[in-house]
Amino acid sequence: MKSKSMLQHKKEAPKKVTCAVITLSDSIKNKKQDKSGKILINALNEKHIVKEYHIIPDDSKMLKSLIKKLANDVDVIFTTGGTGISNRDITIETLREIFEKELEGFGEIFRYESYKRLGSGVILTRSTAGIYNKTLIFALPGSPNAVKLGVNLIIDELGHFVKHVRE
């Protein structure tokens, strides 16, 4: 059951938002190889507008620089990759350095829904979301199935989320 205020907020929210997708990978070199990036772009373009798409290595400085540039041009940034626990997985630490607010609920729901499908191995993912410079950022794992799950959890609420970030 949805609240009256939530329904009102959704009415006032933008119907389409602009998005950017960043794939972080040391092994993916071109857009043809990037299955997760394609899945994310295709899903987002069904309801919103993907303005930017980049593939970068797992490099903290490059990620911060790109996010700072993109935050001036889009409402929402999605990253895919680098959310695990290997030494090269730098996405979460990098984002937490720049987040003005973290939206822990996304990671909690993502892990809960993943757990129902996959079991306790999902403890290894550190997916999260947050806000930087009035821009929403969602950090998804690099696996295609994880990207499908993550985007499906939030795609219908993106306009609602953006409305609140802009306030």
Image: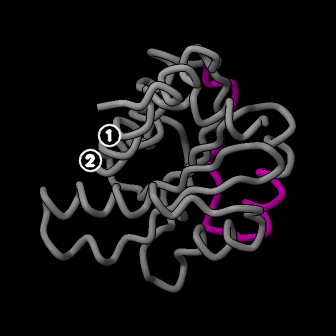
Q: Are marks 2 and 1 in contact (CB under 8 Å)?
A: yes
What residue is shown at x 78% (from left), y 61% (from top)? Answer: 64
User: Left or right: where does residue 139 sit relative to residue 66?
Assistant: left
Which corner quadrant of the image does residue 114 belong to?
bottom left
Q: Nearer the viewer, residue 54 or 145?
A: 145
Per the model, the C-alpha gap separating discs 2 and 1 is 5 Å
Q: Quadrant of the C terminus?
A: top right
Please give the range of residues in magenta.
49-67
Q: Decide which of 81, 11 is in the foreground and name it.
A: 11
Residue 14 located left or right of residue 26: right
The residue tagged with tag 1: helix, strand or loop? helix
Q: Name the amino acid type tagged 2.
A: Asn
Q: Residue 156: x and y, percent?
A: 43, 26
Q: Which residue is mark 1?
A: 148
The amino acid marked with disc number 1 is: Lys
What residue sits 48% from the left and 16% below the top? 47
Q: Residue at x 67, y 66 (%)?
A: 95
Q: In the image as oriented, which residue stretches furthest toward the bottom?
A: 87
